Image: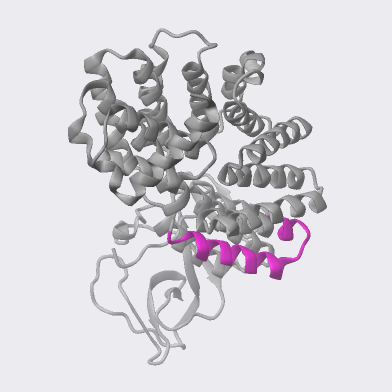
Amino acid sequence: MDNAVHTRNIHRHALQLKMGVFRIMLNTVSAFQAINYSRQEYIKGNFKAGFEVIEEVWRERARFSGDALGKIALCRGILLGAYDYYVRGNSQHQSRETLLEALNIFDDTQNSECILLTANSLAVSHCRTGEYEKAQAFLNIAFTQPFPESYKGRMYSRVAEAVFYNGQKDYQSTLKTLSPYKDLFDKAHDYLKAQFYQSLGVARYGLKQDAVWCFQNASRLFNQLGHLHYLFIAENNLANCYLQADNTTEAMRHTENAVRLARKLGNFRLIGGGLDTQAQIALRLGRLDDALYLSDTAVKTLRPVGGFMLGDAYETKIKVLLAQKDLTTAMLVLSEAARFTKNDKLAGLIADYFKQSSGVAVIGSAVEKTSSVFGVRVKDDYFAHLGIRKDCALIIEKGTVKNGEFAAVLKDGKYSFGFIDVYFGVINLVNGRDAKPHFFYEETASVVGKVIGYCKPNQSKIFPLRFGG
């Protein structure tokens, strides 16, 4: 049977699967044809189409056992993981359950080849969610399987390992993982070759021309494959490379390509990521109003789907607000970001801003008053439920305090803190461990300003306050 006829048969069976007719005639041969079809759709980035086909086979999995069942589970786990991550924004939980089922089957059948492929997929899945210790465990399983570096499955292990290192910004380890095998990857299938250049480009970000060359190769190959999801990533990476090189014209051209691809896919995660890159370019050009609008739109687009791109968008928004010297809003955004994402750099951005603007000078555990923003050390653990313990420093911004805000009051040279009621001229707070409200009169006390965060002892990071839980 020639390739054209074979391809037509696969498509015919796939159509029958979607129609539900295929369930009646399902057997091992037709199931493997469906697996091959789903794999091809995966390589082209058609995650939904590939998943829908293999899902029909999965519903009839009771008809299969041994390696046949394991390969169906492996194919479903890979497609579901990509579909959930890139399209639906769901967790990797269901995908991992299926992949672990496949791994158990292959352990029983002692199928080293499929153990290798399944471990590769589980490692990448855990990298997507930042669970690097678990990812390392599955990489260890993959690399204990006895295959040469020229074997395709082992080459995928190298790509998975690069994803593992790049996710932790250990770029030197990525270069050690990939560089020795460039000749092997150059002879590989376009999809595998494109993955190689994509990962290598991330590791070479600091070497701008090298990174651009890698991402250009990845972009060309993914374009040839018709893989729009990964083509978006390559174009967005190119935009970031040109931005780092201060070539804002090329950066904008590539990010516009990326956003156009994301809109074509209808993928909100990618749209948000592209808008965030555009916001960074606007910030670099000093177009702060445009940058704020784009970063705010990126945050709103990404918030429902989450992921690391949301953390990046919050980071850009805070940078824009600090560039506008809007410290109060930046702190509010920081507090909001703490509820939706994990990005350890966010609090550090505001701490760096304080240092550069001389707003707060940090010496040991003391935060000294230098201008409109200053710190006051807490002398007890009353605010421990907010994460503020003895010897932490509350960061205060001088100025008008709105009703209900957490404020600092100065009386007889001593500070008290609590929620203000501006209409009654009363600060409803406690000082020390006294639970009674304290009334302050303008003749004897003054509201100094709003408490916008706190520093832990011997640290310079500014953390947001968390109320209500």
> Which quarter of the picture shows residue 414?
bottom left
Report x, y in % for residue 398.
Answer: 56, 73
In this rendered view, identify the residue nearer to me: 112 or 415: 112
In this rendered view, identify the residue nearer to me: 89 or 106: 106
Residue placed at 21% from the left, 29% from the top? 64
> Which quarter of the picture shows residue 162?
top right
Report x, y in % for residue 215.
Answer: 69, 36
Residue 162 seen in the figure: no
The dominant secondary structure in magenta is helix
* 58 with respect to 287 (left or right): left
- Tag count in the figure? 0
* 184 with respect to 56 (left or right): right
Report x, y in % for residue 12.
Answer: 42, 41
Residue placed at 34% from the left, 37% from the top? 76
Report x, y in % for residue 318.
Answer: 59, 60
Q: Residue furthest left?
A: 62
- Colouring: one colour
Residue placed at 82% from the left, 48% from the top? 247
* 291 with respect to 401 (left or right): right
In the rendered image of this protein, does residue 134 appear above or below residue 397? above
In the rendered image of this protein, does residue 220 appear above or below residue 270? above
Magenta span: 280-304
Query: Magenta stretch containing residue 51, yes or no?
Result: no
Residue 230 seen in the figure: yes
